[in-house]
Amino acid sequence: MDPSLLEWLVTFAGLAAVLGFDLFLVARRVHEPSIREVATRLTFYISLAVAFGVWVWWYHGAKYGMQFFAGWLTEYSLSVDNLFVFVIIINSFNVPRKYRQEALFVGIVLALSFRAVFIALGGVAVQRLSWTFYLFGAFMAYTAIKLLRHGDHGGGDHGGGGEGGNNFVVRFARTHFNATDRWAGVRFFVRDSSGSWAVTPMFLVALALGTTDLVFAMDSIPAIYGLTRQPYLVFTANVFALMGLRQLYFILGKLLNRFVYLSKGLALILGFIGVRMVLHALRTNEVWFIHGGRNFNVPEIPTPASLAVIVAVLVLTTAASLYRTRGIQASSSPE
């Protein structure tokens, strides 16, 4: 796959236009959206991702189409895990309901920014340093074990030193910056009663979300590079996975406590991707102290099999979670 510069520019412009329109809608009317409103937009974003995947399949071939869908589904499931922590952060700061769309959008923009940096670095690594797949594979195994050991869902151990107000970075900001309790929409700085500049609660929310997004980027980018080595597909899968996260918050916010097996499903997926990475590293081995720098004759896990495993795990863990919690009341909010 070798997308042209024009293809990159058109894709980037199209995705930027969609995200810009989303930002315009948020800024135009600060409010808590209705379920019908967010369901309509979420359906649009999912349909857009599926249509893009079909286009990749048709224009670049089935191999890359399946790689996009496998990467998108993996990143989407990790985004749902990210959503657990977003809920914790927004709740811990008591973000007013009318500002939650703005807070979520700030988190998504930060997530996209961090992922763009990691995509660029990861792309260089996998193209020029084949041995990095050993590191990525080991990191996927570590992440899978971490997910299995911490909590009933993936949100428990991703906060980078604690969630919300307990985040180390947030504590540092509160201690060393002049902070105010006055909300001012998405503004990070306002004048206090003495005329001095002060950071707003939204600034502290952004710090907490940014710390979380940095950790999730470190998990998600190696994961998708284990499924495809195409930066174009890595970038688009990440953007589409994050595109509907704001709407997903309002739809799934009351159901998140029912996805009790999500972390186990993610652990299986990431562990599987880790194995796939190590097998690739062995097939392309150039590390002199491993087998004398010679390649290993090991099998390759094809993309269709990877896609089938990811879909099966997501379906089974979702169904098992909903069955396991069928008698449990949904949480009262994303309050």
Image: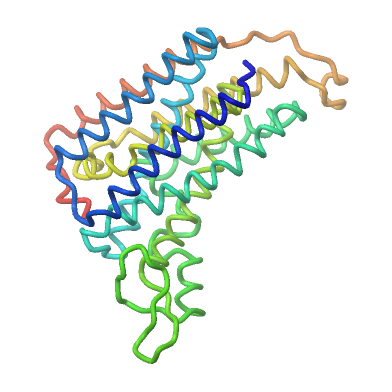
Residue at the image point whose x is 51% and y is 17% from the top: 67
Q: Residue 307, percent across and down?
A: 45, 15
Residue at the image point whose x is 45% and y is 39% from the top: 16
Q: Is residue 133 left or right of residue 269?
A: right
Residue at the image point whose x is 65% and y is 35% from the top: 122
Front position in the image: 12 or 107: 12
Q: Residue 96, percent across and down?
A: 23, 63
Front position in the image: 273 or 54: 54
Q: Is residue 34 left or right of residue 207?
A: left
Q: Is residue 192 left or right of residue 35?
A: right
Quarter of the image with the N terminus in it: top right
Q: Residue 252, percent across and down?
A: 23, 39
Q: In this view, does 88 lie above or below 218?
A: below
Q: Residue 165, percent across and down?
A: 38, 67
Front position in the image: 57 or 14: 14
Q: In this view, does 101 lie above or below 231?
A: below
